[in-house]
Amino acid sequence: MDQIDKYLEEIQEVTGVEIAGGVLIYLGISAAVFLSQLAMIFATFASFMKTAKKNSELTRRVNKVMKTSGWEVVVMKHNMPNAFAVKGKTIFITNQLFKLINKDEVIAVALHEVGHLAGNHVYYRSVASSLKFGVVLPCFVFPPLAWFLLLSLTFVQNRTIGRYQENVADSYATKYGYGDQLISALQKMEKYINKMAPDNPIARTLRKIQEVFDEHPPVRERVERILKEKESIRVIMSGNVKKIKAHLTKKFSMT
Ligand SMILES: [Zn+2]
């Protein structure tokens, strides 16, 4: 009996050390991935800034809408109409975006990007993906498991944190009164992407897979959400208590 107890104790000790070692390795890998992602964020920002030029009119308008002064809109040359935020208070707009959408819509898109920056979304995303790689990288001793984990965890990350952040950024533009312009910008961009995408069975299948993993919710869902939010803002701003009460009851009703 004594021997069995001793044996069990030994196993527990080994297991304890192993768990502690495993956790340390996991945290070490995650921290290393996070640091390399930080380095990438700073390097990407610096390389974008090399060709980017400040757009005074957009900078002035974004700050005026938000009653702030620190945001800066810069334009960079790129063959795709796009906008993105990397770090700090700088919003990148590609020159091609101006060919696709009008100035008010560009402001709406810029406000969406401000939402990402104000919420430190890039950093939260980096932390999440570092924790993911902390699990995935050691599993590459058995690649099929590693790939399975990578795909499943990416799916979960994009569909939870990613989509949540996109909705928060959309709300930012809506809150500042640019919901309609954001809707038309999203619709124009979607139309453009659909027109540009190759139309064959393989490309269509790949697009469907990409949509499943995409951290951006489908445009149709985003439009519905923005419209609902606009309605909430309109009712709340009306100051009519009866209307607000009815609206909130409808919104949070479980039936
Ligand atoms: Zn976004």
Image (cartoon, helix red, strand yellow):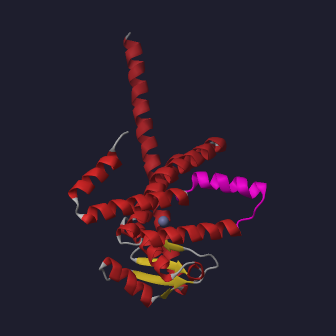
Quadrant occupied by the C terminus: top left
Q: Which residues are magenta?
A: 197-217
| Between 22 and 221, the one nearer to me in the picture | 221
Against 211, residue 171 (above or below) is: below
Q: Is residue 215 visible?
A: no
In this view, the residue farthest toward the top is: 1
Against 119, residue 247 (above or below) is: above
Q: Is residue 37 visible?
A: yes
**Would residue 180 be counted in the magenta stretch?**
no
Q: Is 210 on the left or on the right of 37, as rendered?
A: right
**Residue 102 spot, x, y in % from top left:** 52, 81
Q: Main secondary structure of the magenta part?
A: helix
Q: Residue at x 33, y 77 (%)?
A: 66
| Between 46 and 209, the one nearer to me in the picture | 209
In this view, the residue farthest toward the bottom is: 56
| Between 119 and 243, the one nearer to me in the picture | 243
Q: Is 121 on the left or on the right of 101, as rendered?
A: left
The total of numbered circles placed on residues is 0
Q: Residue at x 46, y 63 (%)?
A: 35
Q: Residue at x 46, y 80 (%)?
A: 104
**Would residue 198 be counted in the magenta stretch?**
yes
Q: Residue at x 56, y 74 (%)?
A: 82
Against 95, residue 245 (above or below) is: above
Residue 234: quadrant of the picture: bottom left
In this view, the residue farthest toward the right is: 200
**Residue 253 spot, x, y in % from top left:** 34, 43
